[in-house]
Each structure stands twice: as C-alpha cells, then as structure tokens.
Image (spheres, helix red, strand yellow):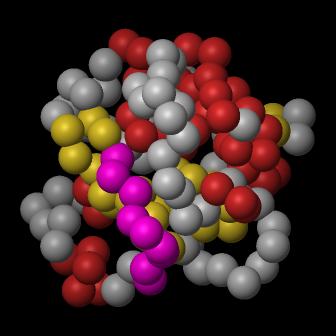
Amino acid sequence: MADPSPVCPSSVPELPDTVVFGVVGGSVEAPRVSYLAGTIEPSRELLDLADPVAPTEVFRFAGPCVERACQQFHDGRCSIGDRLVSLAEPVVERLPRCAIRSRCRWWAENGRAACLRCPAVVTLNNAPGVQQRGVAGPLGAQAGAQG
C-alpha cells in the first residue's frame, strides 16, 4: 500500500492492495481486535487459516477506500466511522498501536474517538448485537465490508 490515499479499516481480502492489520479475538458478544506490528499480505495460506469461517470474521483487512463506489460513503465521509463514534462506547482507554493509522479513513475523519472503538469492529459478524447492527447500518453485519 504505497499509495498515500486513505484506507478503509474494514475492507475485504478480495479487493486489490488489501492487507491484514489485525486478528479478531474475544467473544461473539464482545470481539476485540489485536493489531499486528505491521501489515501482511493476505496470502491464500493465511486466508485458509480462518477455515471454516470467513476470513473477515478472523482478520481485519485494510485496503484503499473506494469512496463513492462504497455504499457506506456519504457526503465525502465514511458513515461507518461516523456511526462507530456516535453509537458505540469506547472499548479501550489508550490508542492501540496500529499499522494503518496514518492513512486510516476513520482516524482522518474521527480521530482518537474512532481508534478507541475500533478494536470492537469485526467486518463480518454473523451474530451482531444491537449496537453492532446500529454501527453497521441498514445493511447489517456486512455494511462495513467495502468502505
């Protein structure tokens, strides 16, 4: 990801130039992302480690923000990041170390407030709670998949 344009912190591995920057842990009710020290390319071998679930349930991916091509992009902003800050409570007290922060769309638009909530985000959550559904928007658990 040598391009300086903003990245989506809730991307999918099928998009070009996507990288893994975190691993989802915790529980279905309270997922928590552990961030990697750097980013890694989503090789087939890595993606296969998620089997039998989807890679987006196990890993957090970042990729170029597709802006207007994304259903979550409105009025020049990512609506997922905005809803994350307005609807979700912080899940950490300090900014987590994050390999994509300098280019992250959510950080650029919402700063620290987004980062304190970001570890609770799972791009594909097949059992989202009420708060998670609200943040994801009307499209449900897959809403943040291409923002």
Q: Is residue 22 left or right of residue 109?
A: left
Question: Residue 137 at what x, y percent from top left?
Answer: 55, 25
Question: Residue 72 at what x, y percent from top left?
Answer: 67, 39
Question: Residue 132 at what x, y percent from top left?
Answer: 41, 24
The N terminus - image quarter: bottom right
Q: Is residue 39 magenta?
A: yes
Residue 49 location, quadrant: bottom left
Q: Does the magenta stretch include residue 107?
A: no
Q: Is residue 34 above or below residue 15?
A: above
Give whichever of 42, 91 is nearer the camera. 91
Query: In the displayed image of the protein, which residue is found farthest to the left?
Result: 52
Magenta segment main secondary structure: strand
Give whichever of 134, 86 is nearer the camera. 86
Q: Going 43% across and 30% down the picture, which residue do you hit?
A: 92
> Which region shows up in magenta?
33-41
Q: In this view, does 120 lie to the left or right of 94?
A: left
Q: In this view, does 108 lie to the left or right of 49?
A: right
